[in-house]
Image: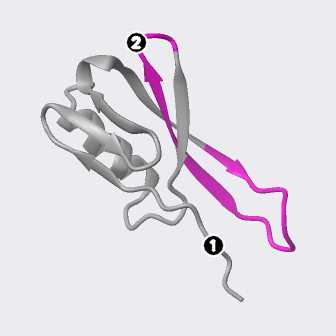
């Protein structure tokens, strides 16, 4: 039996960023992109979970787990900030 994992696809260009589960946002809708890590309390081995935190201009926010992505947490955040000119 295989454990299913959430899959997030992030597609970004100069105009917008799309998150598979959260939709498409123009960069002017995004206030900031932050990072967060926490140690998972579940399971027999404790591991660090990594999240991108997106804060929208309208006050809403959401987080995306990027623990098992091909890039490191800070690389993803830095790339998105540069593309969206949020730096």
Residue under pointer 1: 4
- Whether pointer 2 and pointer 1 mark residues with C-beta atoms closer than 8 Å, the reply is no
* Above or below: residue 68 compared with residue 33: below
Q: What is the distance, in whole Å, between disc 2 and disc 1 at their CAs?
A: 33 Å
* Above or below: residue 7 compared with residue 11: below
* Above or below: residue 59 compared with residue 23: above
Residue under pointer 2: 57
- Could you tell me which residue is drawn at 19 percent across and 37 percent down? 83
- Could you tell me which residue is drawn at 35 percent across and 49 percent down? 76
* Relative side of 59 to 84, left or right: right
Q: Earlier in the sequence, mark 2 or mark 1?
A: 1
* Relative side of 58 to 43, left or right: left
* Relative side of 64 to 83, left or right: right
- Could you tell me which residue is drawn at 37 percent across and 42 percent down? 77
From which residue to which does the magenta span run?
A: 37-59
Viewer-side residue, 41 vs 60: 60
| Residue positioned most to the bottom | 1
Name the image quarter holding the N terminus.
Answer: bottom right
Q: Which element is circle 2 on?
A: loop
- Could you tell me which residue is drawn at 31 percent across and 42 percent down? 18
Viewer-side residue, 54 vs 25: 25
Front of the two marks 2 and 1: 1
Which image quadrant for residue 45?
bottom right
Viewer-side residue, 85 vs 1: 1
């Amino acid at each position: 039996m295989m454990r299913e994992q959430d899959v997030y696809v992030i597609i970004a260009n100069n105009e917008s960023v799309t998150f598979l589960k959260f939709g498409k946002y123009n960069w002017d809708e995004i206030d900031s992109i932050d990072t967060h890590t926490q140690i998972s309390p579940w399971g027999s081995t404790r591991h660090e979970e990594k999240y991108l935190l997106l804060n929208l201009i309208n006050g809403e926010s959401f987080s995306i787990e990027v623990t098992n992505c091909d890039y490191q947490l800070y690389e993803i955040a830095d790339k998105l900030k540069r593309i969206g000119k949020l730096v």
